[in-house]
Image (cartoon, rainbow, N blue to C red):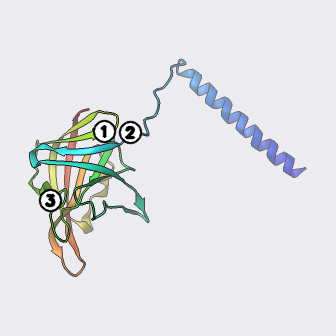
Amino acid sequence: MADSTRWSRIVLAGVVTGAVMVALNSRDGGEEKPPVRASVVPSRIDIPSLGIKAPLMKLGVQDGRIELPPYEKPNTAGWVKDSAVPGDEGSAVILGHVDTKTAPAVFYKLKEMREGQVIKVVRSDGKVAQYRVDTIEQISKSRFPADKVYLEDGLRLITCGGTFDWDNREYRDNLIVYATLVKT
């Protein structure tokens, strides 16, 4: 008997939830909402002033750390798939290596970026999101400005910078380019 009472409550909860959803949807005048474009992804980044045209791959988060593009693909940058799609509202984050053990990588010239320069991101839907560089910041990895990078609107390009720490085998700083959307 207790089992049938529990199932009755579950069914009742489902019916009530469905009724509330129908009521809320009918309040918007019956207008059909545009489909969610979850399949739109950035496919390439172009930085004309630096001569950069690089494919983009999706990067995820594992164990609280953002994946990096593989070192075997030094000319590929990565879009953090939990960030906004460039051209959409929110913070869009793209990472790239500065170098490898033997050669410069995709974001090697990023330190040469200047305020006002253009960054373009080609999307899978054929649109091109165009950004204007606002500021460039080099900051210690221990003081990484997560809120500014991940919570404020705009494009963020991130690579390593500063001096190389031979004991830890990594650069001590991050170089971050902050850019504002101009047009899509």
Say which residue label 2 marks.
40
Q: Check disc 2 and report its element: helix, strand or loop.
A: loop
Percent x, y for residue 73? 27, 60
Percent x, y for residue 97? 22, 61
Given contact means CB atoms under 8 Å apart, are the residues at marks 2 and 3 in contact? no
Is tag 2's residue or tag 3's residue first in the polypeptide sequence?
2
Which residue type carries mark 3?
A: Tyr
* Crowding near the residue tagged with mark 2, few <14, some 14–19, many ≥20 C-alpha atoms within 10 Å: some
Q: Check disc 1 and report its element: helix, strand or loop.
A: strand
The image quadrant of residue 122 is top left
Q: Check disc 3 and report its element: helix, strand or loop.
A: helix
Name the residue rendered at 31%, 54% in the picture: 147
Which residue type carries mark 2?
A: Val
Is tag 3's residue or tag 1's residue first in the polypeptide sequence?
3
The image quadrant of residue 42 is top left
Asked if residue 134 is positioned above or below residue 170 in the image, the reply reads above
Given contact means CB atoms under 8 Å apart, are the residues at marks 2 and 1 in contact? yes
Name the residue rendered at 12%, 56% in the picture: 109
Q: Quote the CA–CA distance across marks 3 and 1.
A: 23 Å
* Crowding near the residue tagged with mark 1, few <14, some 14–19, many ≥20 C-alpha atoms within 10 Å: many
Identify which residue, 132 or 101, lies in the foreground: 101
Residue, far right: 1
Say which residue label 3 marks.
108
Q: Quadrant of the C terminus?
A: top left
Name the residue rendered at 75%, 43% in the picture: 10
Percent x, y for residue 44? 26, 45
Say which residue label 1 marks.
123
Q: Is residue 4 left or right of residue 183?
A: right
